[in-house]
Image (cartoon, rainbow, N blue to C red):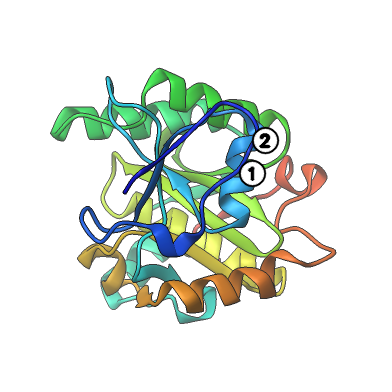
Amino acid sequence: MLSWLPETPVQFPDLDQALDDPEGLLAAGGALTPDWLMAAYRRGIFPWFSEGQPILWWSPSPRMVLFPEEIRIHRSLAKRLRNAGFHVSIDQAFDSVIQQCANSRKDREGTWITEEMANAYQQLHRLGQAHSVEVWHSDRLVGGLYGVALGHVFFGESMFSQARDASKVALVHLCHHMQRQGSGMIDCQMHTAHLARLGARDIARTAFINYLEQYIDTSTNLFSRTLAKNVTSRSQE
């Protein structure tokens, strides 16, 4: 039976109460405030719902994750990294990235990145918890991704591409950045063949929670404001 959450207090049911159909649906209600969102991510829960629906919270099993050192850079992508003329930045255009992610999904099948969701993650960004990776060609934003960082876990939310492989370039640079910071784990949430080809794999919910406990409880963070505001690199990196 689905749990319905009041706006206060911030409290989620046990993960073993997640439904089998639809897979991983845990609860509805609550709020999209920073307190709710950060409590959710710390427990391996994320919001996902469409316009007109209540806030829905999910914790699927299996869970798709990508360990940065396992990123697969195929020959065509390696060539793109060397020769496409991209440059990459971090946290230079968060609002634009989230808007482009919403627009790209809306063009295909409608988007779950509603104005309410975008506002919630923009607030997390202002608090230093949500981050973006941007891919540029000349001065034009052509790709990127955004998500939430806790300790050495990056909870990926969405990505977009307006140039061939631009979103892959963003993901490769995120992996390289995490490796420089001591690695960790990228939460990809749901299985996709696209991410599997890049090295992501499915793990059980219990294993995912164990990794969270290992990587979130650290004294360092993948992103600091000083680092995030100054990272920019050529795509050949």
Which image quarter holds the C terminus? bottom right
Quick check: 86 left or right of 222? left
Task: Assess disc 1: are there few (<14), some (14-19) or many (≥20) residues with their C-alpha within 10 Å of its C-alpha.
Answer: some
- Residue 17, above or below 52: below
Classify residue 192 by image quadrant.
bottom left
Q: At 26% from the left edge and 73% from the top edge, which residue is drawn? A: 197
Residue 116 horizontal/vertical position (percent): 45, 20
**Disc 1 to disc 2: CB gap under 8 Å:** yes
Residue at coordinates 35% horizontally, 27% vertically from top-left? 54
Q: Residue at x 37, y 73 (%)?
A: 200
- Which three-letter amino acid code belongs to the residue tagged 2? Asp
- Pick the residue in front: 142 or 66: 66
For the residue labelled by badge 1, is the local secondary structure a helix, a strand or a loop?
A: helix
Q: Position of residue 22 (x, y in %)?
A: 22, 53
Dot label at residue 38:
1
**Circle 2 sits on which residue?**
35
Residue 53 place in picture, x, y as percent: 29, 26
Q: Nearer the viewer, residue 151 or 101?
A: 151
The residue lying furthest to the front in this view is 1
Q: 3 or 190: which is nearer to us?
A: 3
